[in-house]
């Protein structure tokens, strides 16, 4: 009898400890999550057929570049990239690299303006304009509220600047918590260079990321990373102010988006945040709390670093071709794809180089 009493007591104590741990986990968790139920049925065939094309990239600036997230090109053909150590660096036509400007923190998306300046998003600080002579802060708040997570930027022909604020709750160093919480804190912003004011065009976005203007600049595309889709928001014409889905149900989370060399299609980098394991985690709040509290568990399931993928889509959102490194052998965590002439340039937050792929290797 004593044996059974002792076992019962131990079981009760064990259950009590487990309940206490769960309660403490929830009480001190940095998130208050919603379940994220994803669409089923994206198929790895046709444009999304498996391949290893990205394993053939040429490595540029190896050891010089610290996690180059995005790229841009100027009218002379110089390639700019923002690196994790705070620099904007540029590659000259002879292939040499220059430490051009130090902007600090970890700059992300950037673009070259029609006047030759560089616009760059710096998380926790805002939107900057950088030239040979100076660095200027263009926008850091809206109505007194700081812009927490400026992420990607594009300039229109009239000088208007469109940029994303990925999350109003979580900063750059805790961006993965936005995905786990699965509540829409992202925004699409517009900066007016004449009034020097910033306004919100869209809010309630699921981690607002890459932005790109249409060839006619009548709409802007905005990527929602943890919703695995891109939206089309009309900024001119009869549909002004309307928003619709451009493409959805990606096999990865869309990051930066750039118009392709043909002037009609787009290159989109996809983050490795979708797998059977991750989709299971996304469904259940308790699992989200566990991963939010113990983020090292992400490494165990290969979050972000197990693969790389970029996809080209047409002007109607139809997939054309995808390129990947299926096991992250050469590149992983690819965050941008920019086509210049006969080459595709690839940024990554898990590399010390910029990837370059020739058109003949893309094969479409």
Image (cartoon, grey):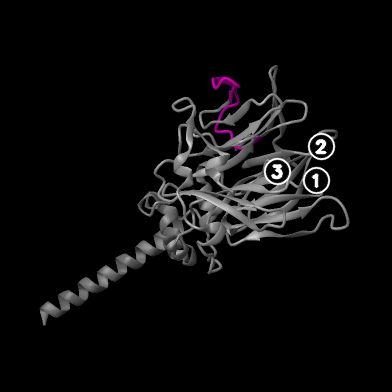
**Residue topped by disc 1:** 217
Q: CA distance from mark 1 to mark 2?
A: 8 Å
**Residue topped by disc 3:** 262
| Whether residue 172 can be seen here | no
Mark nearer the N terminus (1 vs 2): 2
Query: On the picture, is 298 further left or further right than 94?
Result: left
Whether the residues at callouts 1 and 2 have beta carbons within 8 Å, the answer is yes
Q: At x 81% / y 33%, what residue is drawn?
A: 193
Q: Nearer the viewer, residue 147 or 230?
A: 230
Image coords of residue 181 (percent x, y): 53, 58
Q: Nearer the viewer, residue 312 or 354?
A: 312
**Residue topped by disc 2:** 157
Q: Which residues are magenta?
A: 90-110
Mark 2 neighbour class, 10 Å CA radius: few under 14, some 14 to 19, many 20 or more: few
Whether the residues at callouts 1 and 3 have beta carbons within 8 Å, the answer is no
Q: Quadrant of the N terminus?
A: bottom left
Residue 97 in the magenta stretch? The answer is yes
Image coords of residue 292 (percent x, y): 45, 54
Image coords of residue 247 (percent x, y): 65, 59
Mark nearer the N terminus (3 vs 2): 2
Q: Residue pushed farthest bottom?
A: 1
Helix, strand or loop at mark 1: loop
Q: CA distance from mark 1 to mark 3?
A: 15 Å
Q: At x 64% / y 25%, what residue is drawn?
A: 78
Q: Relative to 193, is 308 above or below? A: below
């Amino acid at each position: 009898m004593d044996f059974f009493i002792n076992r019962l007591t131990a079981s009760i104590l064990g259950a009590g400890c487990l309940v206490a741990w769960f309660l403490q986990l929830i009480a001190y968790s940095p998130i208050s999550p919603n379940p994220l139920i994803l669409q089923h049925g994206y198929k790895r065939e046709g444009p999304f057929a498996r391949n290893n094309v990205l394993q053939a990239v040429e490595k540029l600036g190896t050891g010089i570049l610290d996690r180059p997230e995005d790229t841009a090109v100027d009218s002379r053909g110089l390639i700019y990239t923002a690196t994790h150590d705070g620099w904007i660096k540029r590659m000259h036509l002879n292939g040499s690299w220059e430490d051009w400007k130090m902007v600090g923190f970890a700059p992300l998306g950037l673009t070259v303006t029609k006047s030759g300046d560089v616009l760059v998003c710096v998380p926790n600080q805002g939107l900057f304009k950088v030239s040979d002579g100076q660095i200027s802060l263009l926008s850091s708040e809206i109505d007194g509220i700081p812009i927490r997570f400026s992420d990607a930027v594009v300039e229109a022909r009239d000088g208007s600047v469109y940029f994303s604020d990925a999350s109003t709750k979580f900063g750059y160093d805790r961006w993965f918590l936005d995905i786990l919480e699965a509540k829409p804190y992202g925004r699409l912003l517009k900066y007016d260079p004449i009034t020097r004011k910033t306004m919100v065009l869209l809010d309630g976005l699921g981690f607002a990321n890459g932005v790109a203007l249409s060839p006619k600049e009548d709409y802007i595309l905005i990527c929602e990373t943890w919703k695995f889709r891109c939206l089309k928001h009309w900024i001119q014409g009869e549909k002004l102010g309307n928003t619709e889905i451009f493409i959805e149900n990606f096999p990865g989370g869309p990051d930066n988006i750039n118009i392709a060399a043909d002037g009609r299609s787009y290159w989109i980098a996809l983050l490795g945040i979708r797998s059977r394991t991750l989709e299971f985690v996304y469904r259940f709040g308790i699992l989200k709390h566990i991963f939010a509290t113990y983020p090292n568990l992400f490494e165990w399931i290969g979050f972000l670093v197990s693969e790389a993928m970029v996809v080209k889509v047409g002007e109607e959102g139809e997939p054309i071709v995808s390129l990947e490194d299926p096991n992250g052998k050469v590149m992983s965590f690819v965050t941008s794809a920019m086509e210049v002439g006969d080459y595709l340039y690839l940024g990554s937050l898990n590399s010390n180089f910029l990837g370059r792929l020739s058109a003949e290797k893309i094969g479409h």
